[in-house]
Image: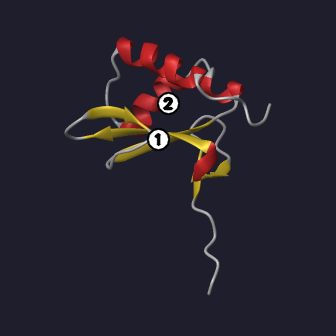
Amino acid sequence: MNQQSPVMRICISCRKKYDRDNLIKITKDHKQGVIFKKGMGRSAYICKSKKCYSDSKIKKKLQKSLKTFLEPEFFDIFKKEIATYNDFRD
């Protein structure tokens, strides 16, 4: 059987390609709003390095890539969600 290559996505902060398993998926679902790790709709990916998710412009980059306004409460949840991940590099 043919071995499939891993699905590659680009981090919106550092613009580098990673395997989808090494990225945090943030999705804007038309029914559920903005959700983490699952869902169908417009998605943005951020790598799990501290440099990327603590970028000062991450709020603007997320809003632009999801094409929506993000409430301040979202970023409180975002920080809690990020705290559950360990850095895999940097």
> For the view shown, which residue lies furthest in the bottom direction?
1
Amino acid on which disc 2 is placed: Lys
Quarter of the figure with residue 58? top right
Image position of 41 (left or right of 87)? left
The amino acid type of the residue labelled 1 equals Ala
Q: Name the N-terminal-most of marks 2 and 1.
A: 1
| Residue 87, x across and y down, in percent | 72, 30
- State which mark lies toward you, 2 or 1: 1
For residue 17, the mark is: none
Is 32 located above or below residue 58 in the figure? below
Q: State the residue in front, 11 or 76.
A: 76
Residue topped by disc 1:
44
Tag 2–tag 1 contact (CB < 8 Å)? yes
At horizontal 43% and vertical 18% (from top left) the residue drawn is 77
Residue occupying image coordinates x 32% and y 48%: 41
> Residue at 59% of width from left, 20% of height from top?
83
Outermost residue toward the left? 31
The spot of residue 49 in percent (x, y) is: 70, 31
Q: Quadrant of residue 1?
A: bottom right
Left-right relation of 47 to 73: right
- Return the residue at label 2: 61
Q: Is residue 49 above or below residue 79?
A: below
Residue 70 in the image: state x and y as whole percent: 35, 22
Local crowd at mark 2 within 10 Å, few (<14), some, or many (≥20)?
Answer: some
Label 1: which secondary element: strand
